[in-house]
Image (spheres, helix red, strand yellow):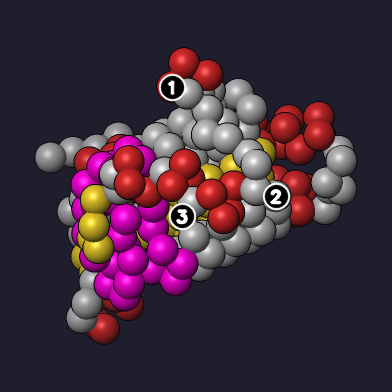
Amino acid sequence: MKFACEEEKIKAGVLFCPADPELVAMKRRTHNLNVDYNQTHEDEFEKRDRILHEIIGEFGEGGRIQGPIAFHYGKHTKIGKGFFANFNFTVQDDGEVTIGENCNFGPNVTIVTPVHPMIASERRAMRTAEGEKKLLCYAKPVHIGSDCWFGANVTVCPGVTVGDGCVIGAGSVVTRDIPSNSFAAGVPCRVIREITEADSMAHMPEVLGGCQVLPDEEQR
């Protein structure tokens, strides 16, 4: 199988060279934009929004990222509307990363897609299909559904899909798929139980303090 460029190899999930000049140029541009974003003040709303739209392939309406941020390519990431990420959001998006609508991430959430060989000598170099000796790796996409909440210090590993409506506990390392409407936590992350109506704040009057749960027709 022949590929026109390293970018095509990434999308196909086969070995590619991260030191390829075109890929390096993409990453350098994004890394510089990360620095620009991280030097802004929190009330520079328009400037921050403009930079995020330069970095991220798709960034939905009403999204906000606290910063500092660290995107690797940026263009390989698509984020739906109503997104929020707290401090130190890191996305190593060699492969595709998709995040649905109305997701909320705590501080230090990290998403990674690249995979390196297990054998040390293969990490140093391999021979390409063209016969050249190069450092090679590959990438697996990460897909996160809508209405997810990730606690602080969650790491999502390559190739993982997290379904809609999931809560991932703080400090979890997500190494396998998590089905929709699950509460999952741990290292490695595992499903603890399904999220049900019994988890509603309506059943916690001691915490509500006079507040009310919105009826379905008023939910955003």
Q: Circle 3 sits on which residue? A: 150
Find the residue positioned furthest to the left. Answer: 1
Q: Residue at x 47, y 23 (%)?
A: 215
Magenta stretch in the rendered image: 161-190
Residue nearest the viewer, comparing 131 with 33: 33
Q: Residue at x 27, y 72 (%)?
A: 188
Label 1 amino acid? Asp
Circle nearer the N terminus (2, 1): 2
**Up-down: is 129 above or below 171?**
above
Q: Is residue 214 in view?
A: yes
Q: Circle 1 sits on which residue? A: 216
Q: Give the class, few, some or many, for how many residues have Cα within 10 Å of label 3's Cα (few <14, many ≥20).
A: many
Residue nearest the viewer, comparing 194 with 129: 194
Find the residue positioned furthest to the top. Answer: 217
Q: Position of residue 149 (x, y in %)?
A: 46, 49
Q: Nearer the viewer, mark 3 or mark 1?
A: 1
- In what element is the residue under mark 1? helix
Q: Quadrant of residue 168?
A: bottom left
Q: Position of residue 187 (x, y in %)?
A: 31, 75
Q: Nearer the viewer, mark 2 or mark 1?
A: 1
- In what element is the residue under mark 3? strand
Q: Position of residue 207 (x, y in %)?
A: 58, 54
Is 187 magenta? The answer is yes
Report the disc number at residue 66.
Answer: 2
Residue nearest the viewer, comparing 220 with 152: 220
Q: Position of residue 31 (x, y in %)?
A: 64, 52
Q: Quadrant of residue 145?
A: top left
Q: Is residue 4 left or right of residue 64?
A: left
Q: Give the class, few, some or many, for how many residues have Cα within 10 Å of label 1's Cα (few <14, many ≥20).
A: few
Q: Residue at x 53, y 64 (%)?
A: 152
- In what element is the residue under mark 2? loop
